[in-house]
Amino acid sequence: MKVGVIVILDDNLESKFEELCNMGMDSCQLVSWDENNLSEEMSIRIKKATEKYDINITAFWCGWPGKVVWDLYEGQLTLGLVPMTYRYERLKVLLAGVEFANKIRVKDLVTHVGYIPENPLDATYQEIILMIRELAEKCQENNQRFLFETGQETPVTLRRAIEDIGTGNVGINMDPANLLMYGKGNPVDALDVFGEYVWGVHGKDGEYPTDGKNLGVEKPLGEGRVNYPAFIGKLKELGYDGDITIEREIDGDEQKKDIKMAKEMLEEIINN
């Protein structure tokens, strides 16, 4: 396992890659929430920058347009492909994201799908399975994979969805903090449910929710409830050999300090 970091795609891409190298890392997941980034011009810039700085982009994290509320109430109505209001516009953007990822030579496309119903007989569940299957089949054309970002789904719902999609190229980008922050499960135990499908991992930490509306609080790695020694140990048992990509969802000097601290902590655990 190697340690990388999230890089937000914008006009400062080259300076962000340079900073990544200065922190002693050479891999990242590239994240975009602006569909205007999915251009030929941007793909050329990315390829030149990855060659210049020798950066390995392990996944393209594709966001989507429309209202977004990260909580346990309005999140049901605004996140991912589940809300009918945004569903088809967002599917179109994700399909474009598949092609963009292929242009920049990235195998894995990642996104949040939303609050998938736990009831597999729910009509919305069946509709979402069909939409993800369409995405997965588009990925197959390019020898790519589609990865669910953990968060809004319980582990068993996520595994069921992967099995029901059934294309063989659908897996999980495991964010252990998200499972806690959404109150969906303990990340170490969740690996017993869907560990074989974990093809990407975020290095992030957080707490369980303390009320019924708001997500739990994100914390610097090592200060939340993710048991990283046990988590990484279980990943090793499962044979996971991909990267752990640090995500710290704040800005400024504090973010940089927390990323550096997380890198040191993760590398120590990985190497023990």
Image (cartoon, rainbow, N blue to C red):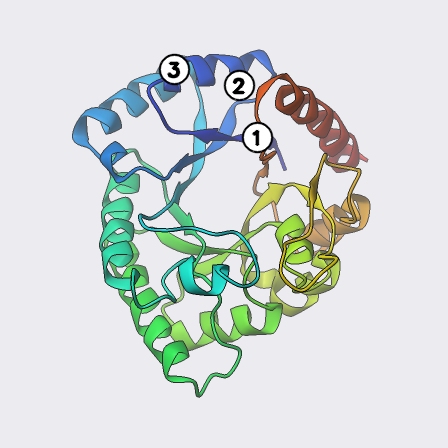
Kindly report the distance in space between the C-alpha atoms of the residues bearing marks 1 and 3. Answer: 16 Å
In the rendered view of the protein, which quadrant contains the C terminus? top right
Task: Find residue 218 and report its image quarter.
Answer: top right
Kindly report the distance in space between the C-alpha atoms of the residues bearing marks 1 and 2. Answer: 8 Å
Q: Residue 45 at what x, y percent from top left?
A: 27, 20
Within-10-Å neighbours for mark 1: few <14, some 14–19, many 20+: many
- Asked if residue 142 shows in the view, the reply is no
Q: Are marks 2 and 3 in contact (CB under 8 Å)?
A: no
At mark 3, the secondary structure is helix
Q: Residue at x 45, y 18 (%)?
A: 17
The residue carrying mark 2 is 20
The residue carrying mark 3 is 14
Location of residue 170 with respect to 124 vertically, above or below = above
Disc on the earlier residue, 1 or 2: 1
- The mark closer to the camera, 1 or 3, is 3
Q: Are marks 1 and 2 in contact (CB under 8 Å)?
A: yes
Within-10-Å neighbours for mark 2: few <14, some 14–19, many 20+: many
Q: Residue furthest left?
A: 40
Q: Residue 189 at what x, y percent from top left?
A: 74, 63
In the rendered view of the protein, which quadrant contains the N terminus? top right
Residue kind at label 1, given as amino acid type: Gly
Disc on the earlier residue, 2 or 3: 3
Front residue of 206/139: it is: 206
Q: Residue furthest bottom?
A: 121
Left or right side of 109 for 236: right
Residue kind at label 3, given as amino acid type: Glu
Residue 4 image label: 1
Kindly report the distance in space between the C-alpha atoms of the residues bearing marks 2 and 3. Answer: 10 Å
Residue kind at label 2, given as amino acid type: Leu
Left or right side of 144 for 193: right
- Asked if residue 186 shows in the view, the reply is yes
